[in-house]
Image (cartoon, helix red, strand yellow):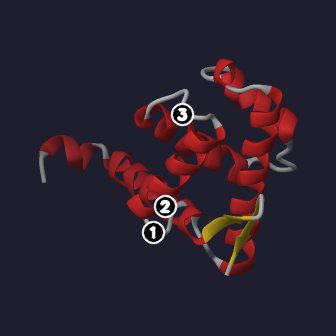
Amino acid sequence: MGLFDFLNPSKRKTNKIFEKIHNEILPNGDTDIDAGVKELMIILNGKIDANEAENIIMKSVYISRVTENFDKERLRRHLQGYCLQHFNENQLEQFYRYLFALNAAKIINGKGPSGVKKVNGKYSWE
């Protein structure tokens, strides 16, 4: 342990907190991230690359989980800061429904994005 680590234990605590939040939101790690990226790229008809989709999905899943009364307008305000231009109204609605399904799957069954599938146009989980 270096002198600066000893003098700044809050950095280690912060990293542990972020790791815990990350594991809570995406319990299956890269598998969940990949599933979210794939679905977002489908929603946006391939308009963005995987790196940008990952950035959007990570931020959006997080904000949807920590925001009380998360709704489509809150999602719009969130995306407005960095990527709303990629979404038309229908795609925004689809993305909101996907995030809603992710939250429901997490609450009901503890499932991450990799456990949510689209069947006949509707999201479901087992």
Q: CA distance from mark 1 to mark 3?
A: 24 Å
Name the side, left or right, on which 14 lies relative to 58. left
Q: Which residue is mark 1?
A: 28
Q: Earlier in the sequence, mark 2 or mark 3?
A: 2
SS at badge 1: loop
Q: Nearer the viewer, residue 41 or 6?
A: 41
The disc at residue 46 is 3
Q: Quadrant of residue 121?
A: bottom right
SS at badge 3: loop
SS at badge 2: helix
Question: At which x and y percent is residue 116?
Answer: 64, 67
Callout count: 3
Question: At which x and y percent is residue 71?
Answer: 86, 43
- Specify few, some or many for label 2: CA neighbours under 10 Å numbering under 14, 14-19, or 20 or more: some
Q: Is residue 52 above or below residue 16?
A: above
Q: Nearer the viewer, residue 114 or 104?
A: 114
Please, what is the three-letter code of the amino acid marked with disc 1?
A: Asn
Quadrant of the image for the N terminus?
bottom left
The disc at residue 32 is 2
